[in-house]
Image (cartoon, coloured by chain):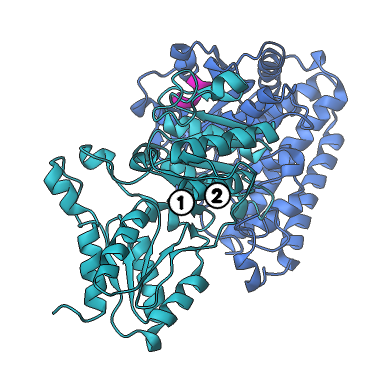
């Protein structure tokens, strides 16, 4: 854990709040999935909160962009999407960010520069590279964070994109959220190397492996990569070592791993370790934390109430939003 | 009026739109320093520089996806595939991203992007390099598909495509690039969804698009000598499809032959034939005929490859069949 005393208290509070909101939102999503309010594929972000929150905290979303894969609830919320809009989308309701047409895997919030939400493993990596291409074409200052899992890193789309980003010097940071399993497959079984951060080396792209359970380490590594991308147009690759507590999706009981493994990660839970470090540094009291947690639970409840009361999309909307 | 090649017409359209709009750029394999594998982009690098005429490595999925990402945030890419055969490497990007991004985002995103290159059989190229793939793209909602057959139509439709705020698949053909036709000096646009009656007639309607439009016209010449007055309709755009012009013609002639150089199973041609059969049923005097590619991969041997494709003879025979002139 980085030393919390190196950071301002309001910044730390914001990180903790954002992680708590995602945690409670996802718990509510799981609950509502169980009640069949949410259907289809639903990939929860519980355990990985420090990655989205710590990295997006390094951005200025007026000029920077975020694209991710299908485990996208955390990124959307960290970019500032309202929990109501996100939950209504999971419910498939008209007030969802994508008017009920995208669902869990396709959260989009263009106003906050969150460009999805993509269900094809690795398919968004060239697209994110294209957003970085636009920044360079227009000589803007922005950068792109492109998130994907350890499962996506072997797709051709990843490798083609890294080569293009390097030959054109695009301001993009490829973020591999290594949560150890591509669906039910331990990444070590299917990767020629176990240090995924070196995957950029054959393209001349520097990589770094970082503890993805420590939100401050995530923030610092991303901030450094963002600075390099902004100032020197240097693409980079970050591997955040993280862990998802739940299965790949709601339908996955995760029998391919042990209870001990899960418990050991729970002891380095991203919310727990930041909270504890702030307690130790006397930057947070139990009361403070309790209030924040209550607020997060309330926001998640409110999002579910909102989604419940939002109307179904009218059948006429079927043929809307196909063409501009 | 100046007479120019199809190749030159495509180049003029790109050139004029790049001059008009800074956001338009050309990206693909060999488009810049090599001046294009088929010389469509000849001279554009010298005129616009490497910022806007961009050579890529041979990574169709990668640069197609880059185009989609750039379009998503406001640029207007023209993505050249050296041929549509290689678009299959980028199929996921087109089908899962370009066609669906607007829908999946509930209308938050526009994708002003053109994918273009030669499609359909050429000569002596065998199975992997001689394919007419329009049906694959036309199948998918969210895409527009345009397939002009003359230099005039190519220029007017490509300019429209570049100005459109949606993904447009623009189909050229290797064997059409040298075809010549009149193209005016002054600027013009051709809207999508308007078929063109290339030849007016009253006895039978021949419907086609892209390269086979020419042999449909030649077949009409042959039929004329036999006393048959054929109408030739060039669809020009497949999606959107101008059903009105098609039905008006068939209601006049009561007989219809559809010509499509793609395979017959679930093709644009079979779809158009079905539409005509359904919507002109009471007025048809014969079942609609479809002249398509044979249902085989393209062979290398020249005699065989010609036998695979629609031809003047096949179209004439189909027309005579719907007129009950041959047993």
Q: Which chain is cyan?
A: B
Q: How packed is label 1: few (under 14 Cα within 10 Å), some, or many (20 or more)? A: many
Chain bearing mark 2: B
Q: Which residue is mark 2?
A: B157
Q: Is residue B48 left or right of residue B316?
A: right
Mark 1 residue element: loop
Q: Which residue is mark 1?
A: B148
> Do pointers 1 and 2 mark residues of a single chain?
yes
Q: How packed is label 2: few (under 14 Cα within 10 Å), some, or many (20 or more)? A: many
Seen in the picture, residue A187 relative to A4 is either above or below; the reply is: below
Q: Residue furthest bottom?
A: B282
Asked if the residues shown at circle 1 and circle 2 are in contact, with their CB atoms under 8 angstroms apart, the answer is yes
Chain bearing mark 1: B
Identified at 69% across, 39% down, the residue is: A114
Q: Quadrant of residue A321?
A: bottom right
Q: Is residue A162 magenta?
A: yes
């Amino acid at each position: 854990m980085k030393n919390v005393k190196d950071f301002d208290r309001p910044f730390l509070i914001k990180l903790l709040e954002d992680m708590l909101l995602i945690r409670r939102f996802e718990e509510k999503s799981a609950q509502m999935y169980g009640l069949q309010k949410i259907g289809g594929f639903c990939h929860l972000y519980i355990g990985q909160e420090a990655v989205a929150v710590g990295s997006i905290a390094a951005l200025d979303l007026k000029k920077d962009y975020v694209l991710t894969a299908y485990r996208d609830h955390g990124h959307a919320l960290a970019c500032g999407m309202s929990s109501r809009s996100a939950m209504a989308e999971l419910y498939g309701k008209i007030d969802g960010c994508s008017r009920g047409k995208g669902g869990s895997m396709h959260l989009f919030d263009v106003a906050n520069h969150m460009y999805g939400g993509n269900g094809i493993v690795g398919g968004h990596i060239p697209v994110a590279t294209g957003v970085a291409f636009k920044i360079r074409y227009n000589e803007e200052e922005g950068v792109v964070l492109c998130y994907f899992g350890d499962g996506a890193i072997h797709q051709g789309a990843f490798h083609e994109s890294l080569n293009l980003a390097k030959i054109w010097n695009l301001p993009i940071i490829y973020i591999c959220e290594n949560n150890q399993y591509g669906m039910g497959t331990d990444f070590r079984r299917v990767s020629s190397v176990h240090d995924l951060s070196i995957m950029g080396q054959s393209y001349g792209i520097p990589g770094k492996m970082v503890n993805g359970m420590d939100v401050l380490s995530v923030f610092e590594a991303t901030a450094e990569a963002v600075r390099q991308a902004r100032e020197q147009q240097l693409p980079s690759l970050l591997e955040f070592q993280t862990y998802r507590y739940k299965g790949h999706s709601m339908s996955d009981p995760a029998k391919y791993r042990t209870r001990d493994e899960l418990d050991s990660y729970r002891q380095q839970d991203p919310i727990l370790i930041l909270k504890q470090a702030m307690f130790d540094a006397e930057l947070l009291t139990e009361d403070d934390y309790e209030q924040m947690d209550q607020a997060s639970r309330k926001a998640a409840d409110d999002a579910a109430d909102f989604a419940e009361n939002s109307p179904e999309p009218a059948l006429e909307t079927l043929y809307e939003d196909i063409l501009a | 009026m100046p007479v120019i090649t199809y190749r030159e017409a495509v180049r003029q359209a790109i050139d004029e739109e790049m001059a008009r709009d800074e956001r338009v750029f050309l990206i693909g394999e060999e488009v810049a320093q090599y001046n294009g594998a088929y010389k469509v982009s000849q001279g554009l690098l010298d005129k616009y520089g490497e910022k806007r005429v961009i050579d890529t490595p041979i990574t169709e999925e990668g640069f197609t996806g880059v185009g989609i990402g750039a379009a998503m945030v406001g640029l207007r890419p023209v993505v050249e595939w050296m041929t549509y055969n290689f678009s299959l490497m980028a199929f996921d990007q087109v089908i899962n991203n370009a066609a669906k991004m607007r829908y999946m985002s509930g209308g938050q995103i526009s994708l002003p992007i053109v994918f273009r290159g030669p499609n359909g059989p050429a000569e002596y190229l065998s199975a992997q390099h001689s394919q007419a793939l329009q049906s694959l793209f036309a199948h998918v909602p969210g895409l527009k598909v345009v397939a002009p057959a003359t230099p005039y139509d190519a220029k007017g439709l490509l300019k429209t495509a570049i100005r459109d705020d949606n993904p447009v698949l623009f189909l050229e053909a290797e064997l059409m690039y040298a075809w010549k036709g009149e193209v005016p000096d002054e600027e013009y646009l051709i809207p999508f969804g308007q078929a063109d009656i290339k030849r007016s007639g009253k006895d039978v309607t021949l419907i086609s698009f892209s390269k086979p439009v020419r042999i449909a016209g030649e077949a009409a010449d042959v039929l004329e000598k036999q006393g048959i007055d054929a109408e030739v309709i060039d669809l020009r755009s497949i999606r959107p499809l101008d059903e009105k012009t098609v039905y008006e013609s068939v209601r006049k002639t009561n007989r219809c032959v559809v010509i499509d150089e793609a395979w017959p199973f679930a093709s644009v041609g079979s779809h158009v034939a079905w539409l005509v059969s359904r919507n002109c049923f009471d007025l048809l005097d014969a079942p609609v005929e479809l002249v398509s590619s044979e249902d085989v991969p393209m062979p290398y041997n020249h005699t065989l490859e010609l036998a695979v494709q629609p031809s003047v003879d096949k179209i004439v025979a189909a027309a005579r069949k719907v007129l009950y002139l041959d047993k």
